Image (cartoon, grey):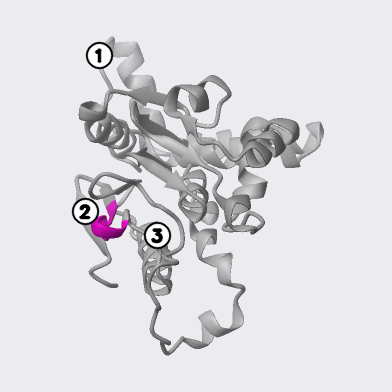
Amino acid sequence: MTDEIAVTDSGGVRLLELNRPDSLNALTDTMRRSIEECVREFDADDSLKALVLTGRGRGFCSGADLANAQPVEKLSRRHRKQPRFWWHLPFDTTEKPTICALNGVAAGGGLGLALSCDIIIAGASAKLHPAFLKVALSPDNGVAQQIVRRIGYSRSLLFFLRGEPFTAEQAAAIGLVDEVVPDAELNDSAMTLATTVATGPSVAIELTKRLLKSANELDRKTALALEEISINLSRGTLDAAEGVAAFRERRSPVWRGE
């Protein structure tokens, strides 16, 4: 890990904060690898159920740090063998919900980082900037695939060709972000959702994410079969028994995450 990110675990929620506020949390190679390891560790820790990602200071992430020369660092064997942008993959492989609290600007690779999360809650002053063509570069950091999944091909192409940032409200209107809240309420909104996840029936939540993530990749028969497998798995949990008991007794369930 590095001091370029800050990590706090509490109540089953991991808060991951980008911590280079003087540069609008511009990404360095050290920062990318630290984020990757942080999400891998989150996924492997059974006590953690949800992740909230945000940036310290007045912006979420301005993309790659183009202003400062970065030192050459010794890489692990795993990092030497993997393509540069594979640092996003732990976001995709974890079955635990990930939430981006998008504060201020998200540009270039910072937009890709936000889009790697399952849910994006944006502060009212947030701006999502394509940035790439402004410096004669094509999209990277998974932006091309993730933005098409959210808003479709033609809207995505228009976004890049025009090169103008979307406001939070514009982004929400076409599904590029999921919710917009007042800036002062952003962190509380994201943490409240994460706490709801962390205190909920964890196995059923993660199985639900698995089903939804695979929905567009499966034919109808396979999707129905996967649903049957998933519901049989969730039926075997202590939380499922508690849910039925609470329903019969007309009380609120007490989830154990088991």
Amino acid tagged 1: Arg
Q: Badge 1 local density, few (<14 within 10 Å), some, or many (20+)?
A: few
* Residue drawn 41% across the image and 52% down it: 62
- Residue 93 lies, in percent from the top left, at 54, 55
Q: Which residues are magenta?
A: 16-23
Question: Is residue 166 inside the magenta stretch?
Answer: no
In the rendered image, the quadrant that contains the C terminus is top left
Q: Is residue 116 above or below residue 37?
A: above
Q: Earlier in the sequence, mark 1 or mark 3?
A: 3
- Residue 257 lies, in percent from the top left, at 33, 41
Q: For the residues marked 1 and 2, what is the alpha-carbon distance in whole angstroms? A: 30 Å
Pointer 3 residue: 39
- Residue 61 lies, in percent from the top left, at 38, 51
Query: Residue 224 falls in which quadrant of the image?
Result: top right
Q: Earlier in the sequence, mark 1 or mark 2?
A: 2
Pointer 1 residue: 251
Single out the mark in the foreground, 1 or 3. 3
Pointer 2 residue: 9
* Residue drawn 26% across the image and 18% down it: 252
Q: For the residues marked 1 and 3, what is the alpha-carbon distance in whole angstroms? A: 36 Å
Amino acid tagged 3: Val
